[in-house]
Image (cartoon, grey):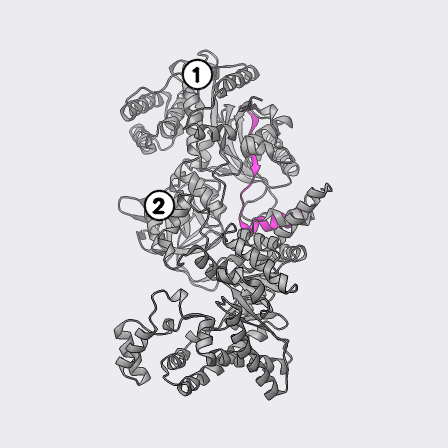
Amino acid sequence: MTRKYVYIFCDGKADGHGTMKDLLGGKGSGLAEMTNAGLPVPPGFTITTEACNEYYAAGQKLPDGLWSEVRAALAKVEAAVGRGFGEPDNPLLVSVRSGAKFSMPGMMDTVLNLGLNEQTLKGLATQSGNERFARDAYRRFVQLFGKIVLNISGEKFDHALEAKKHAAGVTLDTDLTSEHLDELNQQYLAIVREETGRDFPSDPMEQLELAIRAVFQSWNGRRAVDYRRINRIDDTLGTAVNVQAMVFGNLGSDCGTGVAFTRDPSTGDRHLYGEYLQNAQGEDVVAGIRTPKKIAQLRDDMPEVYEQFAAVAERLEKHYRDVQDLEFTIERGRLFMLQTRNAKRTGKAAVKVAVDMVSEGLIDRDAALMRVEPNQLDQLLHQMIDPAATIDVIAHGLPASPGAAAGQVVFDPDEADELHKDGKKVILVRIETSPEDFHGMVASEAILTARGGMTSHAAVVARGMGKCCVAGCSDITINYAKKCFVTKGGQTINDGDWITLDGTHGHVIQGHAPLIDPVLDDNFRTLMAWADEARTMKVRTNADTPADSKVARGFGAEGIGLCRTEHMFFEGTRIDAVREMIVAETLEERAAALAKIAPYQREDFIGIFKEMDGLPVTIRTLDPPLHEFLPHEQEDIDALAAKMGISSALLTAKVNALHEANPMLGHRGCRLGIVYPEITEMQARAIFEAAVHCTKAGVKVLPEIMIPLVSTVAELRLQEAVVRKAAADVFAETGVTVEYLVGTMIELPRAALTADKIAEAAEFFSFGTNDLTQTTFGLSRDDAGRFLPKYVEMKILADDPFQVLDVEGVGKLVEMGVKLGRSTRPDLKVGICGEHGGEPSSVEFCHRTGLNYVSCSPYRVPIARLAAAQAAIADKDGARASSGTA
């Protein structure tokens, strides 16, 4: 069967199974759906994503048969509009746009007004009755085609345009006369000859083929690749190409173009939100060349068009049951729809829209939970400027993406990327952003632009990434050459100076303003309550202090999955007693030092148990190698020796004795407790003394003692015996008994492979996936940062395995460990306590594998709760589908 590469809009649709969206992309399937619904859509056709993939598979050659299908589809478009492509007297012009399955706003390329040459230009002038419009359309076409298809620097065209406006004494493009535009077009054509060594292509069919190739090429352009990497979009999906008859919003005052959302994408409020420009083409709105009007003003300027557009917007939102991102053009008072797609939105908006649409009866609770991306919740937990702070607002712009951020000013996206790699916090400041700036935007804490509106490139991209953005800040004048900007008040902010952006109010603030955590609203609490009802897997937190425990419980943590006792040692002067223990030469000296540490540990455990009243607390015994508690520079060793009252030579010898070639695989974890059982005994006594103290005070305590880095059951049994003896002693001394569990971390491949043996002694497993990843890959997490980004870039690895669980390798060990462990102990409680416990795809894997809980940092607890709910819903939907009851 011959494969079909081209679908005219009336042939395609976004069916419920998503197969047409896979083929036609989001834009193409939306255009097809609107066409079939009878909405006013200019005719056109879509070249499938399969054609893109075959283009690359064939060494960047168009697939056989594609061009004949394109010609046939183009003939149908010509018949529909009554104009001919390349016909001098009655020319059809088309747009050529990208359109992947998943929305990638601004990441790929678009060409407008394609089909113009010296002959069709005259025809367009006659057709429209407006010579200036025709010449302006040609100017835009040559500029876009030259930049996107012929790879000429856009600055060359920009400089020519600015020079022409300056010479003509005007400030806006629209003020240039027809004669000015004719002169400018000749300059543009000369730029093309100079840069490419050939004349601008005049054959419309050649223009179309080159543009289609350029859109395919943009799928693997830097900004598109970066966007897919950040948003974890599959590189093999490919992009569709949409070829559509042009309609013109720049024919006069009864024309216009705009971008709108059916609800506010920043707040989720239910009202039409967007901008439009009269007498303009689409790129004028997003490029920030002119300041657009709010969509509400269209009601006054063109009331009939506004009412029609509002009705279409409402119809589309109800049809898709989601917020829609719409593009439209008005040609001589007639509305045309150019795009509908599910809108990108902030975390706050996503939560509000999901909850509101349940109240409105558009979706059910499961759909609402699936509608919010778990990582979007991270935006709700970001900082805002302290309302009590005194701040110096030096400029005002548009509140393009909410939140607040502080950083050092940088004007170049490449420099922003480099500084970010060095650990610096930067704010990217641009006159206006373009897709080429994407990597710098990713690296920045926030974005500030002098031009552009609420739907400009900067605004849309920032909202999609959850970054703070202030756009259209006309209060500042940017000088790239001098690396500074000057405010209307005369203040100069130089490269490297600190500023703070308030994206919620559009403020630019001098210096590093104090930031505070946000207050979560009722919509958030409602969604989280639904998530808790839907999920079957518990969510705990990694917390080492009472303060962390309190924060985590406030975010819904159902216990502590990892309390790292060594973190307590670094507080205040406690480290002194730890160091005394390390340098002790005899058991008596070590016991004396441990006796100083025990009260600190006990008090910390009391505080944590109180905060986690009624919830389990998993406490890991000492894990890191002892050398981490000692200095390594001679100057620091000498100072510490003096403080401890011992000779510098003795301390130096101790430091040298503890040195290991590979400490992460050396004397640490249970190995320390086996050689120095008194350390484990001290920690166990502190835990049980704290548990008894809290029990007497009416606090319900559920301690779980976890032995780290076990590789054999014999190691666990030795440490278990120490813990159980300490418990028995404390219970005998106090007359109070507390229920507790003893288990282990599975963080070595051998432990996973022999989990059935280890489960003979362990009452629970917790997979320490940080170390399990290190030991499975043979990677040092501390050193792998030098090359892992390259591995991800080269697709050797799909993700950094320390950020996203390696399901294929590490995951297989987890699955094996769970299965083997429960073969010995069917009621074995199993969790995960690495950083993967808060990463959504890793949480989904944990649900599938049958873990009882995941544990993550306090601020990722809501993300894990939602991810666990989504995993349970997907599981339920999958079961329905397989049984035929869906």
> In the rendered image, which quarter is residue 119 located in?
top left
Quadrant in which the C terminus appears:
top right
Quick one: label 1, few (<14), some, or many (20+) residues within 10 Å? some
Report the span colored magenta. 331-358
Name the foreground residue: 752 vs 195.
Answer: 752
Q: Amino acid at mark 2?
A: Pro
Q: Amino acid at mark 1?
A: Ala
Rendered location of residue 797, percent (x, y): 44, 47
Task: Describe the element under mark 2 as helix, strand or loop.
Answer: helix
Find residue 615 and name its label: none
The relative height of residue 141 versus residue 712 in the rendered view (above or below) is above
Dot 1 or dot 2: first in sequence order is: 1
> In the rendered image, which quarter is residue 60 located in?
top left
Residue hosting label 1 = 125
Quick one: label 2, few (<14), some, or many (20+) residues within 10 Å? many
Residue 449 seen in the figure: no
The relative height of residue 55 versus residue 805 in the rendered view (above or below) is above
Residue 587 seen in the figure: yes
